[in-house]
Amino acid sequence: MADRTKILMIDDEEDLTYFVRMNLEKTGKFTVFTATRGSEGIKLAKSEKPDLILLDLVMPEMDGGQVAAQLLANASTKNIPIIFLTALAQKEQVEADEGKIGGRDYIAKPVTTEELIARIESVLAK
């Protein structure tokens, strides 16, 4: 079996992280790690070295922009592509911030599993 793509999802919505993990892993293409807090996600990114990070922008404690900034500042995580997931941010604001905070793409919630897989594969192909 080919190696699975390692995905780290950082989102404070536990039900959503469970749903995404289950649906991505059942394809056989992905291994998904999840964190519900930014600080936990940063630790997992450093220890697991994911191929890609799905990152919610609006979270308590530390928002997605702060998480992305810390990941970009760390030599071991700075090159991991980030796809921002959010239901609350305006698309124009996310697009304006992407270059500053390291995003490679933006997906508005809710998102289908098929759309998420297509976006992940597109970002990883770049």
Image: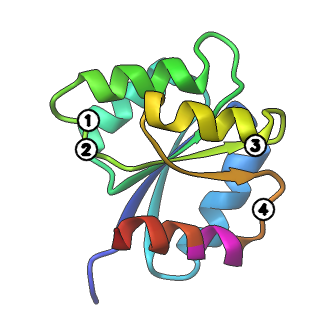
Which callout, 4 or 1, points at the residue further toward the start of the chain? 1
Measure how far apart labels 3 and 1 are at the Cα level: 24 Å
The span from disc 4 to disc 1 (Cα, nearest Å) is 26 Å
- Pointer 3: residues within 10 angstroms few (<14), some, or many (20+)? some
Tag shown at residue 91: 3
Spatial CA span between label 4 and label 2? 25 Å
Q: Which mark is residue 51?
A: none
- Find disc 2 in the rendering and name its residue: 79
Residue 117 part of the magenta segment: yes
Callout 1 amino acid: Lys
Counting residues from the start of the chain, the first of labels 4 and 2 encountered is 2
In the rendered image, the vertical position of residue 108 relative to residue 20, given as above or below? above
Q: How is the image coloured?
A: rainbow
Give the answer, above or below, for where 106 lies relative to 26.
above
The quadrant of the image that shows the N terminus is bottom left
Viewer-closest of 64 and 27: 64
Residue at 46% across, 36% down: 99
Q: Which residues are magenta?
A: 114-118
Circle 4 SS class:
loop
Q: Earlier in the sequence, mark 3 or mark 4?
A: 3
| Circle 4/circle 2 CB separation < 8 Å | no
Mark 3: amino acid = Lys
Near mark 2 (Cα within 10 A), the count class, few <14, some 14-19 or many ≥20, is: some
Predominant secondary structure in magenta?
helix
Q: Position of residue 117 (x, y in %)?
A: 58, 73
Q: Is residue 49 magenta?
A: no
In this rendered view, identify the residue nearer to me: 77 or 27: 77
Q: Secondary structure at mark 2?
A: loop
Label 4, on which residue?
A: 111
